[in-house]
Image: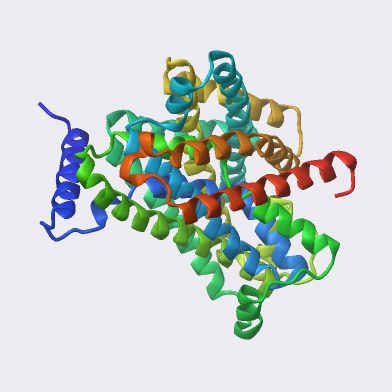
Amino acid sequence: MDSFAARLDARTRAAALDALRGQGRMRLLPFIGPAVIASVAYIDPGNFATNLQAGAQFGYTLLWVVLWANLMAMLVQGLSAKLGIATGKNLPEVIRDRWPKPLVWFYWVQAEVVAIFTDLAEFLGATLGFHLLLGLPMEVSVLLAFAATMGILYLEQQGFRGIELAIAALVGVIALTFGVQLLFTHVAAAPALEGLLLPRLPGPEATYLAVGILGATVMPHVIYLHSSLTQHRLQVPEDEKPALMRQTRREVLLAMGVAGLINLAMLAIAAGAFAGERGMDDLGSVWAKMDHTLGPLAAGAFAVALLASGLSSSAVGTLSGQVVMQGFVGFRISLWLRRTLTALPAVAVILLGLDPTRVLVFSQVVLSFGIPFALVPLLLFTRRRELMGALANTRAIDLLGWAVTALIIALNAWLLVGTFSGRH
């Protein structure tokens, strides 16, 4: 007998096909899922500290940076989704098929390192969320984070729709909690609108924070993952792929738009409630400041948002690791084993008494190294008509994609040089 999860997947596929062919009442809903999962990387615990610090130090001035970063994310994730639809393969598989074996193995090693450090940051975020919300020791919180993440990953083994709905629910929780915090925060409308629409950088430190927001826009692990999420979700004839891509593009705009609004809300809350305050790059201190300034309900909402962000992004990071291994080298390990192995660094951080926020920052530096390795092949492959067919990039998209890629790589290089030279 078919499981409920299998029936749910089948109904989703049937509704999507009906929508593509002009039948049925649900036009966009069956397509919502892959981009929602990918959007979690843009509201992970690393984004919390950056946005809150930017708002506290510079008010609403850097809202425009968040907006531009989100627009770049829409472009990149749309290209990744398109590769999966056009080829029926994910980006690591395409690289494995078309590039020399030594280069493929190098790509696998660097992608695994990036995935491990990305997952470390996200898992620590979930652990810190339990710690702040329930007041439990970090040693206990890490066990709860492990169990909760495994519960989410269990859904993936039952079918694609279950985990899509679970991640969407967690994203909804994050959006709701920051909405609650906005109710307790006085946001000055005119300065906020000016900061959103007028690009300006009032000094070197603001420039560094802006580069941090823009440079960390693209997460290499979700570029790999997004192409995997779309490659088999809905299989259609070649002549229906453009219609499927149109629906996918709408889903990307919607999901990344929600993630962008959450990031804008983070920065606006910090600007409205914590202008001029220091220490906003420490998530534990942020929680304490919220409790003191906005009250326990707002502080509790922040802890819930951090927990939802950590759990969802940790699950997504584990899925990305599976895609990286399967795509580049053609074999898989169980999600349980991968989750256990990637939890060990976080457990070590906690047992050694290291500062979780500092580890989060260091993990973002490591992540920066992997960005060019994901972006460059994505642009190289999506421009090729013999591979992509009717979905090959137009010249305008190709030029825009390379411009964004060059900008992101340059910004991350600037961050890395500054970090290791001690200038930032």
Q: Nearer the viewer, residue 385 or 382?
A: 385
Q: In this rendering, would 330 be left or right of 389?
A: right
Q: Is residue 314 visible?
A: no
Q: Nearer the viewer, residue 81 or 28?
A: 81
* Residue beneath the point at 50% across and 62% down: 177
Quadrant occupied by the N terminus: top left
Instruction: Residue 29 in the image: state x and y as whole percent.
Output: 25, 55
Which residue is at the far bottom?
190
Up-down: is 206 above or below 400? below
Up-down: is 158 above or below 408? above
Up-down: is 387 above or below 167? above
Q: Is residue 238 visible?
A: yes
* Residue beneath the point at 62% across and 70% down: 268
Q: Nearer the viewer, residue 264 or 79?
A: 79
Q: How is the image coloured?
A: rainbow
Instruction: Residue 240 in the image: state x and y as whole percent.
Output: 21, 46
Q: Nearer the viewer, residue 203 or 134?
A: 203
Classify residue 205 by image quadrant: bottom right
Q: In this rendering, would 210 be left or right of 143?
A: right
Classify residue 193 by image quadrant: bottom right
Which residue is at the far right?
422
